[in-house]
Image (spheres, coloured by chain):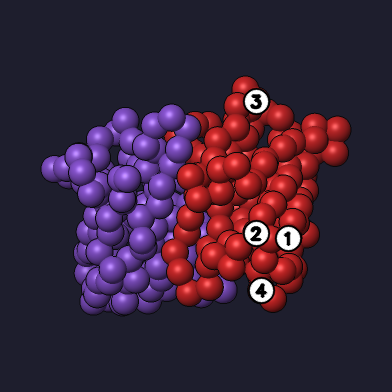
Amino acid sequence: EVQLVESGGGLIQPGGSLRLSCAASGFTVSSNYMTWVRQAPGKGLEWVSDFYRDGNTYYADSVKGRFTISRDNSRNKVYLQMNSLRAEDTAVYYCARGTSFGELLRYWGQGTLVTVSS
Amino acid sequence: QTVVTQEPSFSVSPGGTVTLTCGLSSGSVSPDYYPSWYQQTPGQAPRTLIFSTNTRSSGVPDRFSGSVVGNKAALTITGAQADDEADYYCLLYLGGGTWAFGGGTKLTV
């Protein structure tokens, strides 16, 4: 059974750093497209970052230079390192798995809440 | 900056048919944008309905269908049911490895 479990969210002060984890089971992260999507409270979905199975990574302009996506094949996990956090980064962060380029977000985790506030 | 556009809200009667659309602030949507559609109910993670314009994700009933109509991607729900009441989002590939969601459509049944 495919499962994605996010962790690492919490309350953090503006300017701080946080690392989110996405633990995968039922498949191998290195053979798939792994994506982070976020949703601010009461708002819509926002694509954040991708780790393609060929090793390429991509970022939304809103997080470029501050967030870094990485993959640990031995632990079968994907991470999102978030630095220089701002109030507008407050959101539920979802991890998703895609089996092909066109089906980028086939499976979703339940999300982890990040709150950036002083 | 290209913006993905969706109707903010839509209403359909039970048993009726509704078509939600997904466009671009400039330009036309084509299959090259790999349009996909997601359904989200309150407090839940999104669920994938359609990918690559018109391919239903596994387990999605065939009353959900996707297409490109004119210069927009479209999601059609035929025979709407009460539990179709949800927020619907489209996602488009903008090139250079970047993707963008539309603002979402709140569907009332």
Where residue A53 sits: x, y (%)?
63, 27
Query: In which quadrant of the rendered image does the C terminus of chain B lie?
Result: bottom left
Q: Which residue is mark 4?
A: A117
Q: Residue at x 43, y 42 (%)?
A: B99
Q: Which chain is red?
A: A
Q: Which residue is mark 2?
A: A85
Q: Is there a contact, CB below 8 Å, between mark 1 and mark 2? A: yes
Q: Earlier in the sequence, mark 4 or mark 3?
A: 3
Q: Quadrant of residue A77?
A: top right
Where A4 sits versus B54, above or below? below
How far is mark 4 from mark 2, CA to CA?
9 Å
Q: Nearer the viewer, residue A95 or A57?
A: A57
- Are discs 4 and 2 located on one and the same chain? yes
Where residue B79 sits: x, y (%)?
28, 65
Q: Earlier in the sequence, mark 2 or mark 3?
A: 3
Judge the density around disc 2: few (<14), some (14-19), many (≥20) Cα neighbours within 10 Å. Answer: many
Q: Secondary structure at mark 3?
A: loop
Q: Nearer the viewer, residue B63 or B4?
A: B4
Mark 4 is on which residue type? Ser
Which chain contains the residue that carries disc 3?
A
Q: Which residue is mark 1?
A: A16
Q: Quadrant of residue A51?
A: top right
Residue depth check, mark 2 versus mark 3: number of the one nearer the observer: 2
Q: Earlier in the sequence, mark 4 or mark 2?
A: 2
Q: Secondary structure at mark 2?
A: loop
Where B88 sits versus A54, above or below? below
- Outermost residue to the top: A54
